Each structure stands twice: as structure tokens, then as C-alpha cells.
Amino acid sequence: MSTSHQLPTLDNIFLAAERLRGVINHTPIFFNAHLSEQYGANIYLKREDLQTVRSYKIRGAYNKMASLTPEALAGGVVCASAGNHAQGVAYACRKMEVKGAIFMPTTTPAQKVKQVRLFGQEWIEIHLVGDTYDDAYHASMAYRDSTNAVFVHPFDDLQVIEGQGTVGLEIFKDADFKIDYLLMAIGGGGLASGISTVFKQLSPKTQLIGVEPEGSPTMHKSIQEGHVVTLDNIDKFVDGAAVKRAGDITFDICSKSLNQILLVPEGKVCSSILQLYNEEAIVAEPAGALTVAALDLIKEDIKGKNVVVLISGGNNDITRTEEIKERSLLYEGLKHYFIIRFPQRSGAFREFLNVLGPNDDIARFEYVKKTNREQGPALVGIELKSREDFAPLIERMDANRVVYEYLNDQPDLFQFMV
């Protein structure tokens, strides 16, 4: 397939590293004993969650802006983002003393808006527009067209990709071992494109593995189809890696350079977020934990190998903790929801409690008494100690003639009720 755009070069990624010196943190690679033992491999974590703005995005944003002429910068810059890219652009604006306009959806959590304002201070103005990223993007395009501002794309831009490629340079320089596998998250593909540009030349035998959320398989689908596709609906939970359309430049690079793309269920990502926090005291955002969650999918391949796993960011909103725990429990088969129709008489609930096992816990109960009916429906959430406890629970419910409807495998009803 012929390309009509320029591609990033290793020389330019070295130049980007020079531009970024003194601006970003050269983040460490740590050997991780827990994961290494779990997978029978040597697992190393590249910690971009320890970056200046708690994600790698500052690299691409700053490199793009630093490569512009003073005349271009005089008109300011503009971007659209609901998260880490906005923080990277804001930080670069303050550092370079360039005016920036940052468009974010009105649904962006207040914590993220506050962070962007903190990093950019008086050098930026924030515009909250529409309900989705697409609304913010279209508004940012209109702003660009009506001013002299330069649009800083979150991923499909040569200088942005080369900035993200500096992560790959650091990994290559710091690893005093042969890297067999390198795992990196993919949203639009800027990070994977930059890193693979480095590794295809400096370490061509390293297996380059991209990781996407199952609910947003944008690059995976595009490579399957042989061209960039736009997905109609995506699960936005892994917000740092959930985009409807990959980039043209990034698709061209990833389709040729990546050895594999793994798709990880969102619930599995949640389990990895909790594991990283509980075992390593690492606060990873969903996109940052994607790569750790993917290790299970290649556990047989990586046995005895040297594996570098990129933790891409740590901007996790604490208000999402309950949702993360819930999604993890559902994925692990430890939480189950039912609509149970109780006979409208005293003692009915007590009889149901006798059906539960000694380790089963009622985690949610919502009941409205229907005075004119024989049965009253209740939403009941049951938490188990072990996945294996589910089948015996169902057997006991059936044996005791409990009238129920199981919700976990009915997505429309589940979302409406739970």
C-alpha cells in the first residue's frame, strides 16, 4: 500500500529526545518480582505513570510545539482532549509561554479539568463543549479555522509520534538485557507508532505487541480490514485508549510493524488496576493497566522471556474506584445480579437467606412491595468468595423453587437495572 504522508524517522526521534531534555522525566524501568513469579518470566515495568503530567502525552505535545516556528507559535495552539493529551498540551503551553485553547467535553470529570488548568495556568483557556470528544474536536476545528492557532493532534501527527517515540529510546538505552517482548497500549496509535519506529531499527527481533480494550478494537479492526475504519460504537471505559478511528499515519506504521494486537476485556483491566494498586502501590489508569492485563493472553509464549510492559499513565480518577471494583468482580465471576420474585408474605426473605451458602454475601437489595400482587420483585446482588460457588448457588435456588431472572448475561436489562 503506497503512502502519501511522511513517516517518522529514528534521527528525528533522537532530535525529539534533545528537545525534551530538561522538560520531561526520563522514567525508570523496574524489574517486577510479583508479575515475574506469576508468569515465569522476567517482567519489567516502564513507568510512564511517573512522568511530569503522569502520562507519556507530554512528549508528543511538547515535541510538536517545539518544532514549530516562532511565527506559527505566535498564533497559539489548540487541541481537543478529554484527558492526558490536554494535560500535556497545557504543560507545554506554560513551559514554552505559548497561548493555548483546550476543548473538552462538558462531561469531563471536574478533577481532570482542574488538572489541565493547574498545568497550563494563565497560558491556557478551557472550552467545555458538547457531550462527547467528537463534539469538542469539531469545536476545536472551528476555532482553528477562525484563528491562526496550530492544531496539536493527539496521535496522527509526525512530530507527536516522534515525541512519543522517545519512550522507545529510553527503554532501549536502559535495558541491559535482550528484550524479547514489548507490550504497549493503543488508542489512536501514536505511542505504538513511535516506539515501533525505534525498535524495528535498533532491536528488530523484539516482538512488538499492541494492546487494545475489547470494547474499542479500533486498530485491530483496521488492520483486519486492510484500511482505517471508523467504529460506530465503542466502550469508553478505558478512556485513554478508546477512540473510534485510528490515525492514517499510525495505521500505516502499526499495520507493518506490530507483531500482534491483543484485545483485553474491560473487566480484566479493572482486575489489573486493583492488582497493581494492592501489590505494587502503583496507581494506573485503565489505559495504563491494559498491558499488564494482556499478559494472561500470552502467558505460554513469554515463559522464561524478558518482557517490558509499558505503564502508559496514572491519571486515575478516584471517583471511579467503585465502578472499577464492580467491573472486576463481574469479570472474575464473583458478583451476580438477579431479579427475584418473592412471595408477598412474612418469612419469604428469611427462607431465601437459608438458600445462600456460608460465604455468599448480599451486596445489593432493592425491593418495592406490591400490595395488589402475590409476588414482589427485588433486585438482588450476591457476592461470592469463589467463582466455583456460583453453580451450587443456582442449584439451591432451583431446588427451593426460587423464582428468579439472571441479569449478568442480559446486557440491556443489566445496564438499565444495575
Image (cartoon, helix red, strand yellow):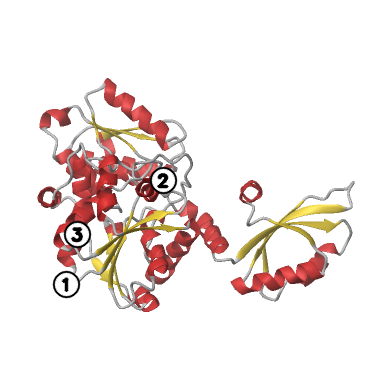
Query: Element under label 3?
Result: helix
Residue ranking furthest to the top: 146
- Specify the quadrant of the image occupied by residue 158: top left
Mark 2 to mark 3 CA distance (whole Å): 36 Å
Type of amino acid under label 2? Gln
Q: Position of residue 416 (x, y in %)?
A: 64, 46
Type of amino acid under label 3? Phe
Query: Element under label 2?
Result: helix
Of callouts 2 and 3, the N-terminal one: 2
Label 3 Cα neighbours within 10 Å, binned few <14 / some 14-19 / many ≥20? many
Q: Are marks 2 and 3 in contact (CB under 8 Å)?
A: no
Instruction: Tell me if residue 121 comes above or below residue 282 in the rendering.
Output: above
Q: Is residue 128 visible?
A: no
Of callouts 1 and 2, the N-terminal one: 2
Type of amino acid under label 1? Asp
Q: Are marks 3 and 1 in contact (CB under 8 Å)?
A: no
Q: Which mark is residue 176?
A: 1
Q: Is residue 365 left or right of residue 50?
A: right
Q: Position of residue 312 (x, y in %)?
A: 31, 56
- The residue drawn where x is 64% and y is 52% is 410
- Nearest-to-viewer mark from 2 and 3: 3
Q: Is residue 198 visible?
A: yes
Circle 2 residue: 111
- The residue drawn where x is 17% and y is 50% is 23
Q: Position of residue 72 (x, y in %)?
A: 15, 29
Q: Which mark is residue 199?
A: 3
Locate the N terminus and report the quarter of the image it occupies: top left
Of callouts 3 and 1, the N-terminal one: 1
Query: Element under label 1?
Result: loop
